[in-house]
Image (cartoon, helix red, strand yellow):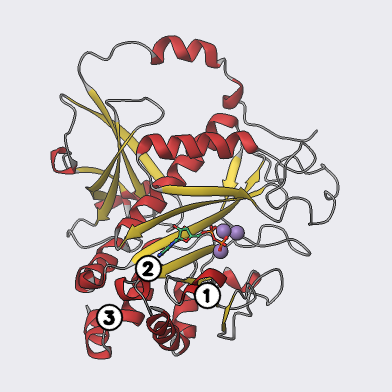
Amino acid sequence: MACHMSLSSRLNKAVRQQYMSLPQGGKCQVTYIWVDGTGEGLRNKTKTLDTEPASIEDVPEWNFDGSSTYQAEGSNSDMYLIPVRMFRDPFTLDPNKLVLCEVLKYNRLPAETNHRTSCNKVMEKVKEHCIWFGMEQEYTLLGVDGHPFCWPPNGYPGPQGPYYCGVGADNAYGRDIVECHYKACLYAGVKICGTNAEVMPSQWEFQVGPCEGIEMGDHLWVARFLLHRVCEDFGVVATLDPKPIKGNWNGAGCHTNVSTKVMREEGGLQYIEEAIEKLSKKHAEHIAMYDAHGGKDNIRRLTGQYETSNINDFSAGVANRGASIRIPRQVGHDKRGYFEDRRPAANCDPYTVTGAIARTCLLHSEEEDEDKSK
Ligand code: ADP
Ligand code: MN
Ligand code: MN
Ligand code: MN
């Protein structure tokens, strides 16, 4: 079996336990997490605080070397880490923390890949609408050699069919990771709401939500950090490539479910339809924001096949998994609820996606133009 696991994952974990259970003298380990200059990669580093922070306000600003994260020139490389949301650390346990940070440049303006600042501005403006999101993060497990986890070294597993929500050693590849990640999210306080095996073997999904406004991006980024960290323990790699394997294999998306207060109330379908109408007029702009590389990655995925729409067309429909926007069957029946934007790729920035949806659906066009010029 060519499951190529990393050497560190084979270190003796029983020895580790001796140290992990030592008391830590009343100190608190705080791990700062941020998005690097690729817009996809996550970085982290840890510092000791004398007391456990009660809330995010108690966590001090910090800095890092941006020239080592594709974020700055070496001659002017200090970047600021601004703590924005705190979670429990499921690896070193209480009282230790994981803290998601925004990155600011030397002049305290947002770094190029810090899309949270502008997203937050939109979310503040639309606060009265109580916009909720739920994102379905699909990902693919690879060995450290880059080959899909547990696929035969030469060739392919049997065709798609038995793997989606499958069970059994011949169908489910890497469930340990999925289960450990789920528990880690719950312990941390990440709003994970479910998980399932996907259509392609070694491909999985977890869902986060419902989250209000800016919370969506925060929780999804930390859920991704936990995924990469859990995979590290097992010696495998999770990729968010939107189409990791060419040919007759499903790609990986990040379906984004959306509702506002009025959509969730009786007769809300009317407001869902209005939102879809607005989205239909901005299809190309949204596509350009729905993956980590300005729409270029999603071209490989949004072919119109394998439960996707074609990248060039906008479509919407009840229970239609080949449409850009799907209204779930139950929502069509109840005439209230939420809609699903199926276009975002697995490697999208959730701040960019949720910010774009909130802007298009809820801001008047003058406000929108004003917002963009900032
Ligand atoms: P699918 O049938 O598309 O695979 P999933 O069960 O995987 O659906 O995901 C559904 C997502 O919808 C979850 O992330 C959940 O949080 C989200 N969701 C449920 N209700 C709402 C709502 N009212 N507004 C926004 N998101 C919602
Ligand atoms: Mn799903
Ligand atoms: Mn899925
Ligand atoms: Mn979906």
User: Tag 2: residue type?
Assistant: Thr
Task: Indicate the position of residue 262 as horizontal and vertical percent values.
Answer: 31, 75
Q: Nearer the viewer, mark 1 or mark 2?
A: 1
* Dot 1 crowding, Cα within 10 Å, few <14, some 14–19, many 20+: few
Marks 1/2 in contact by CB < 8 Å: the verdict is: no
Looking at the image, is mark 3 or mark 1 earlier in the sequence?
1
Which residue is labeled 2 in the image? 354
**Distance CA(mark 3)–CA(mark 2):** 15 Å
Looking at the image, is mark 1 or mark 2 earlier in the sequence?
1
- Residue at the spot 25% in from the left edge and 62% down from the top edge: 110
Q: Nearer the viewer, mark 3 or mark 1?
A: 1
Q: Quadrant of ligand 4?
A: bottom right
Which residue is labeled 1 in the image? 333
Task: Indicate the position of residue 210 as horizontal and vertical percent values.
Answer: 38, 57
User: Tag 3: residue type?
Assistant: Lys
Q: Is residue 170 visible?
A: yes
* Vertical side of 182 occupied by 363: above or below: below
**Distance CA(mark 3)–CA(mark 1):** 37 Å
Judged from the image, the secondary structure of the residue bearing numbered disc 3 is helix
Which residue is labeled 3 in the image? 372
User: Tag 1: residue type?
Assistant: His
Nearest to the observer: residue 84 or residue 105: 84
- Residue at the spot 61% in from the left edge and 22% down from the top edge: 10
Judged from the image, the secondary structure of the residue bearing numbered disc 1 is helix
